[in-house]
Image (spheres, helix red, strand yellow):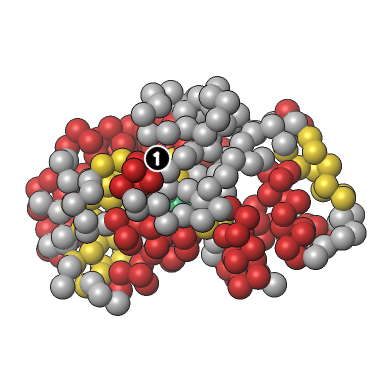
């Protein structure tokens, strides 16, 4: 039976992913406060003692604006913490999975990014995640790096864009939605299934993994309202300049799963179908 060690297991993706391995593998699902990836010695001991075949590293500071305001904290967790996990994998011979982001790009491309595009992050979060990618590639031969984008999921515990928009649209008659930044909305359940299919195979490398599409928040909100049958809330398209945030956002962070497609491993459906599935099965 394969042994699987997971960091950040209580996060949005971790809650969808851990159960998929639990059936067939011996899983050690870790998170703060007990297993802090910034503590190199502790992580090394935990991984050495558990002897995993696979280490799935999801732990991260994911609040992009907090990262911008606290760059040292972002670096400690996303860059150095990832390095600590990679070092422990190197010592024990475990294969490592790392989750990265479309925010490693400057966003100037007019169409979705593919794996061969050169990274050029424009904010602290993107830089710290890219540093993490470099550490994994430098220290290990057997790794899977998955770059993903605009995750949604979580059901009852969802406080992010989809659940928030649904709630606001029920309470208000008008909502402003940004229409000049683009991403690929991705359902954590679909992403978890895709990871489950690749991890443990000999197809090591770097893969973009998103639900198919390239859309802005206005388009996503329109679809949320359609799925929920909300008719008395008007959506107003606005520029991102109307909502200034500490961290600059790339105009484009949508991705295309080119490497998974080439392997015949692209299980990801379109974003609209995934969003409808999520909302109707868990939020309505
Ligand atoms: N969410 C997205 O839209 C998105 C997009 C692209 C890529 N990703 C990547 O996908 C991965 C999973 O994302 P997610 O949305 O599931 O993140 P999440 O919900 O924020 O979960 C991250 C988990 O990591 C934990 N954590 C933070 N610092 C830690 C530390 N020092 N040691 C151990 N655990 C720590 C967090 O604990 P606390 O909650 O207690 O801080 C949380 O449980 C991350 O690597 C993220 O960068 C996410």
Image-quadrant location for residue 139? top left
Q: Position of residue 146 (x, y in %)?
A: 36, 46
- Circle 1 is placed at which residue position? 258
Between 201 and 233, the one lying in front of the other is 201
Numbered label tally: 1
Image-quadrant location for residue 78? top left
Task: Let me know if residue 39 appears in the view.
Answer: no
Task: Let me know if residue 222 appears in the view.
Answer: yes
Using the image, determine if residue 270 lies above or below residue 145: below
Residue at image location 63% in from the left, 55% down from the top: 272
Secondary structure, mark 1, is helix
Assign the C terminus to one quadrant of the image.
Answer: bottom right
Q: Is 96 left or right of 127, judged from the image as shown?
A: left
Q: Position of residue 103 (x, y in %)?
A: 48, 34
- How many residues crowd around disc 1 within 10 Å: few (fewer than 14), some, or many (20 or more)? some
Residue at image location 36% in from the left, 46% down from the top: 260
Q: Position of residue 87 (x, y in %)?
A: 17, 43
Q: Position of residue 265 (x, y in %)?
A: 35, 53
Residue at image location 23% in from the left, 36% down from the top: 137
Q: Is 81 left or right of 140, judged from the image as shown?
A: right
Between 278 and 69, the one lying in front of the other is 278
Looking at mark 1, is its residue's CB closer than 8 Å to ligand 1? no
Q: Is 112 left or right of 25, judged from the image as shown?
A: right
Residue at image location 58% in from the left, 26% down from the top: 110
Image-quadrant location for residue 7? bottom left
Assign the N terminus to one quadrant of the image.
Answer: bottom left
């Amino acid at each position: 039976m394969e042994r699987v060690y997971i960091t950040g297991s209580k996060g949005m993706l971790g809650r969808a992913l851990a159960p998929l391995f639990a059936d067939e593998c011996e899983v050690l699902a870790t998170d703060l406060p007990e297993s802090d990836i910034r503590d190199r010695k502790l992580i090394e001991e935990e991984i050495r003692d558990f002897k995993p075949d696979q280490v799935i590293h999801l732990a991260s500071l994911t609040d992009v604006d907090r990262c911008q305001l606290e760059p040292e904290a972002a670096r400690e967790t996303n860059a150095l913490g990832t390095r600590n996990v990679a070092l422990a994998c190197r010592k024990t011979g475990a294969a490592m999975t790392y989750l990265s982001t479309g925010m490693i790009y400057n966003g100037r491309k007019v169409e979705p990014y593919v794996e061969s595009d050169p990274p050029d992050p424009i904010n602290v979060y993107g830089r710290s995640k890219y540093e993490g990618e470099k550490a994994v590639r430098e220290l290990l031969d057997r790794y899977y790096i998955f770059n993903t984008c605009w995750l949604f999921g979580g059901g009852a515990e969802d406080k992010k864009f989809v659940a928030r928009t649904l709630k606001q649209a029920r309470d208000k008659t008008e909502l402003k939605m940004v229409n000049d930044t683009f991403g690929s909305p991705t359902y954590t359940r679909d992403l978890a299934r895709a990871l489950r299919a690749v991890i443990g195979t000999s197809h090591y490398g770097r893969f973009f993994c998103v639900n198919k599409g390239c859309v802005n928040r206005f388009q996503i909100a329109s679809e949320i309202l359609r799925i929920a049958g909300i008719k008395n809330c008007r959506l107003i398209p606005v520029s991102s300049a109307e909502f200034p945030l500490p961290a600059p956002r790339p105009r484009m962070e949508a991705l295309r799963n080119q490497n998974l497609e080439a392997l015949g491993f692209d299980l990801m459906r379109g974003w609209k179908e995934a969003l409808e599935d999520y909302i109707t099965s868990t939020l309505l």
